[in-house]
Amino acid sequence: MNPSGKMIGKKLQDNSALIILAVLLVTGSICYPKFLTPLNMFNVVRQVSFNGLIAIGMTFVIITGGIDLSVGSIFAFASVFSSYVQTLPLPLMFIITLGLCSLMGLFNGLVVTKLNIAPFIVTLSTMMGYRGICYLLTNGGTTRRIVNDQFVSISRSYLMGLIPVPAIILLLVLIAAAWVLKNTTFGRTVYAVGGNSDAARMMGLPIQRVKILVYSISGFLSGLSGMLMASRMSSGEPVAGNGYEMNAISSVVLGAALLSGGKGNAVNTIFGAMVLGVLNNLLNMQGTMSAQVQNVVMGVLLLLIVIVQSSIKWADGSRAGT
């Protein structure tokens, strides 16, 4: 393929989530008159905020060539533990809960790096273990009510009466994550570790430290998302976050990241999360599908999207070695 064709293919590949999102928005506006109303769009953004925070953390992990299946369980832990510390001052409540969630991520990173065990195995194990802690804390799965009005108001508040606070928090985290990945030594090392760990090791880069940190970031952001959901629902839910790890991974993959590592960015991940959120919203607007049928349709649509993205990779020669 000629250089200009390769360049176009790469641009399409890198921005595929944004293109798909634009197509979905146009389709939704044609099919459903209320789809593009500010009320519905901000509702979608609020729902995406919870998955988006987790997905940003997952982006760091996947760029290094890892995976974190425990994010949904850490999300649930943050939700449940918030109910235990709700009598504390709000800043202390966040510090303690998010500190514990970061330690959960730190533990994942330590086991992966120090014992040299595959991230899939480690985080699959901690996914079950952390979820078990949630059930122990709630006597087998009882929902715990949160009555701290100051905490509950966080996710129920709006800026200028329209923009949900969780969306603002997501935007701030996104800006910080994008800046770190692009402009810091740590960010460049994250890409180097995922792109070629042997070369990174020969260059003397702190591979283990970086991997431990990215899992800690994943735990922190999963915990933050879980606390915001607990605030939204005014309860600690031990079953919260089931399947969220798949949503987060899907968002990162839709954002054109490579599961093998070395490629990805936070902005495209959020576009991927928006694709999932808009798809879900459109299926809900359709109104006649059961939840089971919606899951099937969502799965088929995601598979088609990934196939299209893969076709673009083949077209620009990135997979063919040309």
Image (cartoon, rainbow, N blue to C red):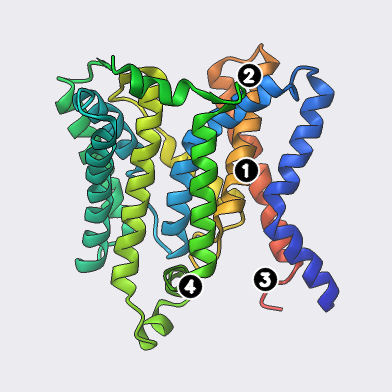
| Mark 3–mark 2 distance (CA, rounded to whole Å) | 37 Å
Amino acid type, callout 3: Ser
For label 3, count other residues whose C-alpha is less than 10 Å away and answer few (under 14), some (14-19) or many (20+): some
Residue 283 vertical placement versus 19 (above, below): above
* Residue 100 percent location from the top left of the image: 22, 43
- Provide the residue designation for mark 1: 303
Please report whichever mark, 1 or 2, sits nearer to the chain's N-terminal start.
2
* Residue 17 percent location from the top left of the image: 67, 48
| Mark 1–mark 2 distance (CA, rounded to whole Å) | 19 Å
Q: Residue at x 46, y 77 (%)?
A: 196
| Mark 3 vs 1: CB contact within 8 A | no
* Residue 264 percent location from the top left of the image: 56, 60
For label 4, count other residues whose C-alpha is less than 10 Å away and answer few (under 14), some (14-19) or many (20+): some
* Residue 295 percent location from the top left of the image: 55, 27
Residue that protrudes farthest toward the top in the picture: 288
Please report whichever mark, 3 or 1, sits nearer to the chain's N-terminal start.
1
- Provide the residue designation for mark 4: 188
Please report whichever mark, 2 or 4, sits nearer to the chain's N-terminal start.
4
* Numbered label attached to residue 284: 2
Q: Nearer the viewer, mark 1 or mark 2?
A: 2
- Provide the residue designation for mark 3: 318
Amino acid type, callout 2: Asn
The answer to whether residue 181 is left or right of residue 139 is right
Classify residue 232 by image quadrant: top left
Q: Residue at x 40, y 27 (%)?
A: 229
